[in-house]
Amino acid sequence: MKRKDKNPKAYYWVKKTLVRCFFTLIIAAIAVVMVIPFVWMLSASMKTAADVLKLPIKWIPEYFYPDNYIKVWNIGGKATVDYHFSIAYFNSLKIAFINLTGAVLTSTLAGYAFAKINFRGRNVVFLIYLATMMIPTQVTLIPRFVMFNSLDLMNGHLPLILPGLFTITGTFLMRQCFMQIPNELKEAAVIDGAGEFQIWAKIMVPVAKPSMASLAMIVFLWNWNNYLDPLVFLSDWRKYTIPVALTNFVEESLTEYNMIMAASASALIPVFIVFFIGNKFFVEGLTAGAVKG
Amino acid sequence: MKIKLSRKVKTDLTGYAFILPNLMGMLCFTLFPLIFSLFISFTDWEFTRGLGNWTFNYGKNYIEMWTDEWFLSSLKNTLVYALAVVPITIFLALVIAVILEKYCYAKVPMKLAIFMPYISNIVAVAIVWIMMYSPWGPFTLAVKALGWENPPAWLGDYDWALPAIIIMAIWSGVGYCVLIYSAAIQGLPQDVYEAADVDGANEMTKFFRITVPALTPTTFFLTITTLINSFQVFAPIQIMTRGGPGTSTTVLVYYMYTTAFTFYRMGYASAIAWILFLLLLVATLIQWRGQKKWVSYQ
């Protein structure tokens, strides 16, 4: 009797495991397709120019050839052409960090007001905010170009920094976050005689820290990957950010594929590191607006 | 002299003080440029003539564009691109996410791998894909290995350049959709599935009758966001093909960019930007109206 009872269960378990293994293989194949361009990029970045063209592809280079990276970064200052990659790197990091600090600060302030302060006209202003979320940045690009040009700010970083200090999406995200904090927390502080700013700084911000971290990661990514704006606003290599420096690099060294790959890898790896460290916040930030809505 | 403010006024003031930095930014860099852009789009302004030297031309830009071959190609390519990228990306993402969440081992590393293209700098990705499509690149070799002996020169081929960019866009965009779907699947109530198990429903029935309907709000969200992003495609085009060969890959943003910053025809370029904006509005509106028919909120 007992055996008969057990058999279907074992059969079910085996079947389930087999199905799972089968599907895991399919997903693994997809994962490989997603990763292969990166693997190829890395391996090509460590080959000599001639070896990149050799078939069949050697995924693991026969010998490690770090010269490409040394040339791209001009380590030791001996490269024949200096691509000023480290300057572009510094510029990109600088802009990204200024903007993420500014954007998180302004979004947290405004998000708090929209969620917890009952001022007159709040709903109307918020509705305007929602409406402007639809406006593509390309529509405002030409006026921004004209504005910054007449203010004589072209070919500097201010045209990228000033608009980057504010984000409507971020304000929306922070409002969502503050809405979930119970009002009692604020009321208790009001009874103790705390002002709004104190409440914001001492009570609300500590609670909202995970959301702020998520927003910071998203803003960092936006800035790091922004291409159209720097392309329009920057014309001098001293001011280039990584994306513009990279396309410029490709134009200058069109046939040196190994060098191009080393440059691309240099641009990608830091973001991967940031992503793997902050994975949790990142995923939360991206899914926050999506799933609840 | 001390003015005593009523409590209500005080609340108003603190409220506006909190949103002031943000509000100023929005007014300076979104609302004002928006109105300015609408204004320029109705003029014949060319940047080289200097600020103020424009004449109102009564919407001539908006009429002229419909006889402009470059504009028409850009519009067509943008639509083709979006209508190919959006459904394929979302369908693939749905299938991958469901398998990943329900029938798969080693979820986390798989997810990270699938998500990698999305966080990658689009410029670097586009550059790597130029190489992927070259005659000795892995993509061309893989296609050859699958039995296609004389594959086209992808980005250099009039008919294949746009599909090649579409393939890359799907590759780089699918990770984000998988991530959003995964989060949504994790939030689905389990009791419905248990009830279906009791009724003896098989996996396919469960997928089509429970999972897909329950995920419609997520699908709706993803359709809108990926559609908006697809209409705005620029970097891959500018880097990989520059709109060519011929007009085969020009898209609206790329055409706007060259009109404004190569030929400095700010009026006409602004009109193109507004057509893009209208396109986004109409697409969103249609979906918003249509959502009642297929989106089920519980």
Image (tube, grey):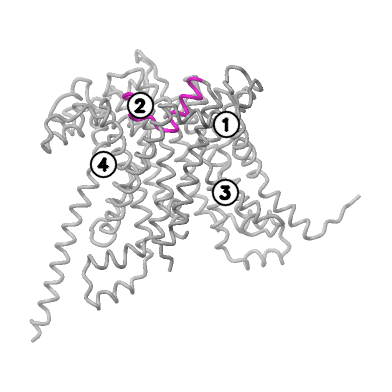
Task: Say whether residue B245 is magenta.
Answer: yes
Q: Secondary structure at mark 4?
A: helix
Which circle, 2 or 1, is nearer the viewer?
1
Both labels 3 and 1 in a single chain: no
Q: Give the residue at x 27% y 27%.
A: B158
Which quarter shows the N terminus of chain A?
bottom left
| Amino acid at dot 1 | Gly
Task: For marks 2 and 3, give the CA distance.
Answer: 34 Å
Question: How far across and how far down the image is residue A225, in percent?
Answer: 43, 36
| Amino acid at dot 3 | Ala
- Local crowd size for mark 2, using a 10 Å CA cut-off: few (<14), some (14–19), many (≥20): some
Quarter of the image for residue A37 reads top left
Q: Give the residue at x 32% y 22%.
A: A70
Question: How far across and how far down the image is residue A8, in percent?
Answer: 12, 76
Instruction: Report the chain holding disc 2.
Output: B
Task: Say whether residue B162 is magenta.
Answer: no
- Pointer 3: what residue? A131
Q: Disc 2 or 1, which lies upstream in sequence? A: 1
Magenta-drawn segment: B241-263
Q: Give the residue at x 44% y 62%.
A: B292
